[in-house]
Amino acid sequence: MTQDAVIKDEEIAAQAAACVVRLRADDVTIADIDAATAWLDQDPAHRRAFDEAEGLWAASDVLDDRSDIQPAPVIDLSAHRERRKGPGRRWMVAVPAMAAAFVAAIFLGPMLQTAPTVIYSTAPGETRTVTLDDGSRLQINGGSTLSVKMERGRRLVHMDQAEATFDVAHDAGRPFLIDVGESQVRVVGTAFNIRRSADDTQVAVLRGVVEVSDLKQPARRVRLTVGQSVQRDDADDRMTVAPVDVRTAAAWTQGRRAYDDRPLREIAADLSRAFATPVTVAPNAANLRFSGTLVLDDEAAVIGRLERFLPIKATRGPQGVRLERR
């Protein structure tokens, strides 16, 4: 490696360390997050250095909490990185490298304590309302699982095969991030509904502004305001923005579902969340379209209404209800 390459490598390491510290700070801002995202997108080496910096600080959790020591603003990772470059310089920097890592871990340990991850799950037919430590309120639909991690500089949620309505407490210095499918939703304080199915992700804004971006390509993003929604299909990976009626976007919280030309497979997935008995659809009926409002009072009654509106018949068995084309 040339001297210029070494210098560039160390500059990137220092930038990565400063970036991680800033994102973990209590007063982190949206501008800070945008700047960090832009820097990560510039070069794959930036991402590697960032991941290494985060990994080093994560290791600090094993050390004692030294709350009487003020946290240092940055970590010098240069010595730590030099240890991996080969036997020629490894022993020359081993001692300062370990010292730098040890001091950094002690100084930053109290600031970077790993927050616990809390998992919330609901059975089909069960709904749950959760109030987080920051005052944010989640209404979780049936058959859903999501995890929440409340860190100092950010609030993190992960969703998979779930639906929930979020009313996020405003905190400009602590963004609320939701990883769902291949997308990330970012807010500061607003209300919205997210529905993640086996085939797509839907986000509908009930109040405020929400940004939805690609997890792997953060620059690919859409910004939604109240009365807008985005649907991202896994098959074609497109983000389709459309208007949405805020009165019906989260109607499941009031015991009903509103549809506008939606496929039967989506309705069946919703019913499987709303009731204990799962509902599946035969391939010959999966793409039948339905528009209207379904009152989720009783599963048998709801299935009966669908049979009257669509050319389908329901078969009940030990595995649940199966909808087939008549």
Image (cartoon, grey):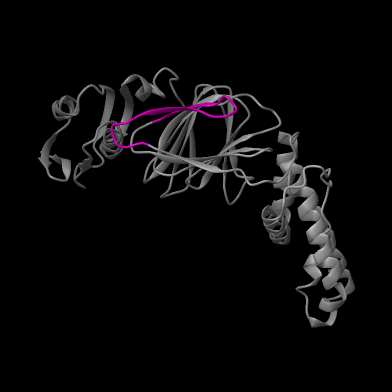
Image vertical order of residue 247 relative to residue 270, above or below = above
Screen quadrant of the N terminus = bottom right
- Examine the image and state in which quarter residue 24 appears: top right
Image vertical order of residue 215 relative to residue 132, above or below = below
**Can residue 16 be seen in the rendering of this structure?**
no
Picture coordinates of residue 174, whole percent (x, y): 67, 33
Single out the residue that lies furthest toward the top: 247
**Can residue 104 be seen in the rendering of this structure?**
yes
Picture coordinates of residue 268, whole percent (x, y): 26, 37
Count of numbered circles in the view: 0
- Examine the image and state in which quarter residue 127 appears: top left
Picture coordinates of residue 321, whole percent (x, y): 16, 39
Screen quadrant of the C terminus = top left
- Examine the image and state in which quarter residue 309 appears: top left
What residue lies at 26% left-to-right and 33% top-to-bottom? 271
Single out the residue that lies furthest toward the bottom: 88
Residue situated in front as seen by the camera: 310 or 207: 207
Picture coordinates of residue 314, whole percent (x, y): 12, 36
What residue lies at 15% left-to-right and 41% top-to-bottom? 324
Image vertical order of residue 114 relative to residue 270, above or below = below
Please tell me whether residue 132 belongs to the stretch shown in magenta. yes
Residue situated in front as seen by the camera: 278 or 263: 278
What residue lies at 61% left-to-right and 25% top-to-bottom? 189
Q: Which residues are magenta?
A: 122-140
Please tell me whether residue 153 belongs to the stretch shown in magenta. no
